[in-house]
Amino acid sequence: MMLQFLVGTLVSLINTGIHALVTVVAVAVARSAVPRHTIWPRLHLMSVMIAIAVVLKFAHMLEILVWAATYLVVGVAAADGDVLYFAFVNYTTLGYGDITPVREWRLIGPLTAMNGVLLFGWSAAILFEVLLKTLEHLGLAETPGPRLPRN
């Protein structure tokens, strides 16, 4: 059981590093892509959000490939099992259950799911932050705080 936790923790750390790198790049790109004045600010906002979402999706796919490679190396799935599919199902917490790990690696699926949930939440936070900052730069965001009644 300790080997499963060790492998799961190591892969989670690798994936967290990948996500951290992608976060730094995505935020830098988003900041540099936001001009102060644009003719179509909403279209610009949409393009920035789509670009960041695509970058994050590629990061998740890379992280799933890291899990699949790990599954292959340690022999998690049966010989006829599709490790990439198995990694996708676990990482996304879809959990079809049509492929199951070998008995010695039963905990690797939940460890993969924990990693996926954490990184999907992180991605949602990145998208939200980029949205807020882009709205602020384009002058489309309202100032936070209580509203005073109008006379």
Image (cartoon, rainbow, N blue to C red):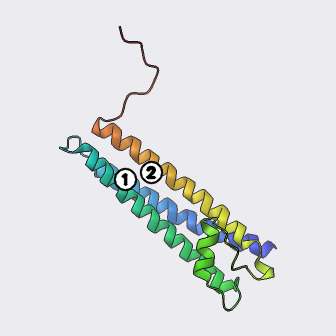
Q: Residue furthest bottom?
A: 79
Q: Is residue 143 left or right of residue 113?
A: left
| Residue in the image at 61% along x and 65% along y | 13
- x and y, in percent, of residue 18 in the image: 51, 66
Please state which amino acid type lies under the numbered disc 2.
Answer: Leu
Instruction: Give yes or no for contact between labels 1 and 2 (Cβ–Cβ under 8 Å).
Output: yes
Instruction: Please name the residue shown 37% across and 30% down the image.
Output: 142
Residue 9 visible somewhere in the drawing: no
Instruction: Report the front residue among 8 and 125.
Output: 125
Residue at position x 56%, y 75% from top?
66
Task: Look at 28% across and 39% down and name the residue there.
Answer: 138
- Residue 21 percent across, percent down from the top left: 47, 62
User: Which residue is labeled 2 in the image?
Assistant: 127
Q: Which residue is mark 1?
A: 49
Q: CA distance from mark 1 to mark 2?
A: 7 Å
In-image side of 34 versus 98 (left or right)? left
Q: Hey, which residue is sitting farthest left in the picture?
A: 39
Of 136 and 20, the residue lying toward us: 136
Picture coordinates of residue 71, whole percent (x, y) = 65, 81
